[in-house]
Image (cartoon, helix red, strand yellow):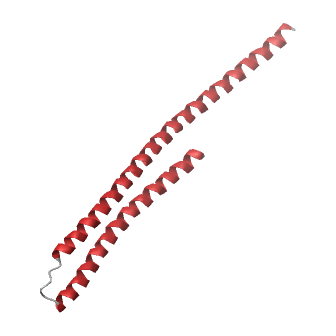
């Protein structure tokens, strides 16, 4: 049961991580568009000012932030993948233990039947 809960927890983390990346991209686009709108409004008042250099600086800064966030997400995804692999291994071990338990139980029943049979044939 714990393994099943771990699987759903891992899946939820993966979804949250994907949502984080989508949010970062959305916010990046919003910031760029906001800057562009505001800069165009200012350049209408002062046509000598060109905002392209500042916009490029903003985009560079936003890209650096997005890259750092993506690296953090990549680390999280690698961790999630390792967790999934560990869960698969634990599931295999659990299945093997259950198989061994069944074999031991069957073997125990056979031994008990033989012991009872010997007990009644001796007397």
Residue 60 placement, left or right of 2:
left
**In this rendering, position of residue 70 left or right of residue 11:** left
User: Toward the viewer: 80 or 7?
Assistant: 80
Figure quadrant of residue 96 = top right
Q: Which residue is drawn at 43% across and 55% down?
A: 14
Q: Which residue is drawn at 43% across and 47% down?
A: 79
Residue found at the far top of this picture: 122
Residue 38, percent from left and from top: 25, 84
Residue 61 lies, with reference to residue 110, above or below; the image says below
Rendering coords of residue 24 (x, y %): 35, 66
Judging depth in this view, the residue of 63 and 94 nearest the camera is 63
Residue at 52 percent of width and 53 percent of height: 9
- Does 114 sit above or below residue 66? above
- Where residue 29 sits: x, y (%)? 28, 72
Q: How many marks?
A: 0
Q: Is residue 84 left or right of 111 when viewed as pictured?
A: left
In the picture shown, does residue 41 fall above or below 69? Answer: below
Q: Residue furthest bottom?
A: 45
Image x and y of residue 122, in percent:
84, 7
Quadrant that contains the C terminus:
top right
Q: Which residue lies furthest to the right in this view?
A: 123
Location of residue 33 by image quarter? bottom left
Is residue 91 positioned above or below 51 on the image?
above
Position of residue 52 in the picture relative to residue 33 (left or right): left
* Residue sitting at x 83%, y 12%: 119
């Amino acid at each position: 049961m714990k393994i099943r809960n771990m699987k759903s927890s891992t899946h939820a983390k993966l979804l949250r991580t994907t949502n984080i990346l989508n949010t970062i991209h959305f916010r990046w686009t919003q910031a760029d568009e906001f800057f562009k709108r505001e800069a165009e409004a200012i350049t209408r008042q002062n046509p000598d000012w060109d905002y392209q250099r500042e916009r490029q600086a903003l985009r560079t800064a936003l890209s650096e932030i997005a890259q750092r966030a993506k690296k953090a997400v990549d680390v999280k995804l690698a961790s999630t993948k390792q967790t999934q692999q560990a869960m698969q291994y634990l599931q295999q071990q659990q299945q093997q233990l259950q198989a061994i338990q069944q074999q031991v139980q069957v073997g125990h029943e056979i031994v008990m039947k033989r012991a009872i049979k010997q007990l009644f044939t001796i007397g």
